[in-house]
Every structure is written in C-alpha cells, then in structure tokens.
C-alpha cells in the first residue's frame, strides 16, 4: 500500500468517519432572540385564547319577550322570560331582578 487515503491513520488502520453534528453550523451560533420571540408569541397566544374563552362563557340573566307583543300593549309577567346570554357592552339590557318595575 503505497498510497493512503485521508482517513487512514499513521499506522495504516482506517479512521471512522467524523460525525457532522460536531461541526460548526453554517450561519454561526443560534439566534437566542428568535427563540425568545417564538416563546413569547406562544405564551401570548395561549393567554389571549384563554381570556377570550372565559369572556365568551360569561353570561348574564336578562329579560326576553316570550311571544309577540303589539305596540302599546301592556306587558305582563306571562309575556317575558328570563334568558341567559353573553351581552355586548353597546347593547342595553334589562336585568331579570324586577321585571315589572321597568319602564
């Protein structure tokens, strides 16, 4: 054996191939700010999702019309029912506490 490959050791025995995992990554070291940003986005998304889920489940008891009521007709307790629903802050509602005292 007059010629030896680059992997051959000095004593003539072949060396095992080097693993590529120990070599340096192209592009340099890891970008820690990107990992931090990704983690922040995941935590922020989970928090927003939880808050929306809790807010959507929050319901209040309001009065609803049980059957059609004509204009000018006096409303009695038989004409209204209590409904539990999620309300919009821009919508005015009547609380179910005292239905006949409303004007």
Image: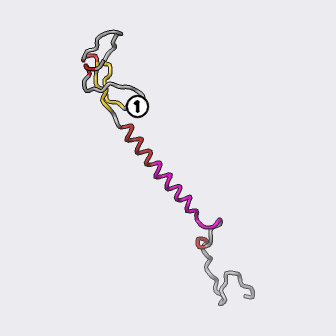
| Residue at 30 percent of width and 27 percent of height | 95
Provide residue 52's location: percent of width, then percent of height: 42, 41
| Residue at 33 percent of width and 12 percent of height | 69
> Does residue 23 lie above or below 11 as drawn?
above
In the picture, measured across the screen, residue 12 lies left or right of residue 55, that is right
Label 1 Cα crowd, 10 Å radius (few <14 / some 14-19 / many 20+)? few
| Residue at 28 percent of width and 14 percent of height | 75
| Residue with the most extreme right position | 2
Label 1 sits on a secondary structure element that is loop
- Which residues, given as a range, are shown in magenta? 27-45
Quadrant of the image occupied by residue 72 = top left
Color theme of the render:
secondary structure
Principal secondary structure, stretch drawn in magenta: helix
| Residue with the most extreme bottom position | 11
| Residue at 71 percent of width and 82 percent of height | 5
Depth check: 76 or 28 in front? 76
Q: Across the whole image, how many numbered discs are drawn on residues?
A: 1
Depth check: 23 or 27 in front? 27
Depth check: 8 or 25 in front? 25
Residue 29 painted magenta? yes
Quadrant of the image occupied by residue 77 = top left
> Does residue 53 lie above or below 81 as drawn?
below
In the picture, measured across the screen, residue 67 lies left or right of residue 9, that is left
> Does residue 13 lie above or below 87 as drawn?
below
In the picture, measured across the screen, residue 55 lies left or right of residue 20, that is left
Q: From the image, which quarter does the C terminus lie in?
A: top left
Provide residue 81's location: percent of width, then percent of height: 28, 22
Pointer 1 residue: 89
Q: From the image, which quarter does the N terminus lie in?
A: bottom right
> Does residue 29 lie above or below 58 as drawn?
below
Residue 91 painted magenta? no
């Amino acid at each position: 054996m007059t010629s030896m490959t680059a992997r051959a050791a000095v004593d003539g025995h072949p060396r095992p191939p080097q693993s590529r995992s120990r070599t340096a990554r192209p592009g340099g070291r890891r970008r820690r700010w990107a990992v931090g940003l990704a983690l922040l986005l995941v935590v922020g998304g989970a928090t927003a999702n939880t808050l929306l889920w809790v807010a959507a489940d929050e319901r209040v008891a309001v009065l609803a019309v049980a059957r059609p009521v004509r204009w000018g007709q006096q409303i009695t307790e038989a004409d209204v029912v209590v409904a539990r629903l999620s309300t919009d802050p821009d919508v005015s509602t009547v609380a179910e506490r005292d239905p006949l005292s409303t004007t």
